[in-house]
Image (cartoon, rainbow, N blue to C red):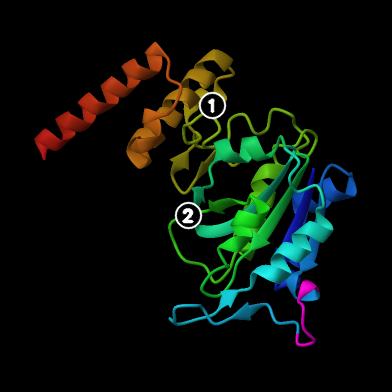
Amino acid sequence: MRFDVFTLFPNMFVGPLGESILARAQKAGLIECAIHNIRDYALDKHRTTDDIPYGGGGGMVMKVEPIVRAVREVVPDYRDPDVTVVLLSPQGQLFTQRLAKVLSRKRRIALICGRYEGVDERVSMLLGAQEISIGDYVLSGGELAAMVIIEAVSRLVPGVLGDPTATFEDSHVSGLLEYPHYTRPREFEGLAVPEVLLSGNHAEIARWRREQSLRRTFLRRPDLLDRAALSDSDRAYLRKLRQELDTFQEQE
């Protein structure tokens, strides 16, 4: 898996790509990350990459020529079905674990980091870029969003995580939030680890974790339940939770 990042601020990636899981994955040859300065592909001696918008308005718009030229030179096979060009944009499709899994099947991903008021619309048109947003809020540019995508997708590349099953129970993988975790000490400031986790009964532990996952999702992100794969026992437990909540609200 190779990531090619196109940005006006390449130094922003030095720290995140040089630490922890991403650093080890690169060292092992499981992923490759290359950072490209869009200014290097500008057409004038001043390395201009932005200009005033047609039609007026505040701010500047990133120019089409340097970006298209950069991607075409660095990723000549950008139209290959096994290659995806991504434009980080607040207008894009919301980035989810499901989308991360789709992207993890690609051989190569080109990430274009927007800045200023936006990117010339012709960039997406000419490169067939998939526009992606990491959330409904405003950032100064696409660099942090690109880092999020690299991290989330890399975790799904075989071998990147030491334990091949490590991602299976992560929040959002199953459509639910993950259950709570505990480690030593057994008790801290009056708060004890749930007894079931100390029982050694793996079936009971699995049941407890599933119920806790359902409970957290029900209380914190009930919208996820509409898309989650639920068993009959899951639905029965959720009905019980709803009844408990209704009873509590009536007593108040």
Per the rendered image, the range of residues in magenta is 41-46
Which residue is situated farthest in the bottom direction here? 46
- Vertical order, 95 against 69 (above or below): above
Q: CA distance from mark 2 to mark 1?
A: 35 Å
Residue 135 tag number: 2
Q: Amino acid at mark 2?
A: Gly
Regarding mark 2 in the picture, which secondary structure is present there? loop
Q: Is residue 39 magenta?
A: no
Q: Earlier in the sequence, mark 2 or mark 1?
A: 2
Q: Main secondary structure of the magenta part?
A: loop
Q: Amino acid at mark 1?
A: Leu
Q: On the image, numbered disc 1 is attached to which residue?
A: 197
Depth check: 160 or 53 in front? 53
Q: Is residue 16 visible?
A: no
Depth check: 184 or 19 in front? 19
Regarding mark 1 in the picture, which secondary structure is present there? helix
Of labels 2 and 1, the one closer to you: 2
Residue 45 tag number: none
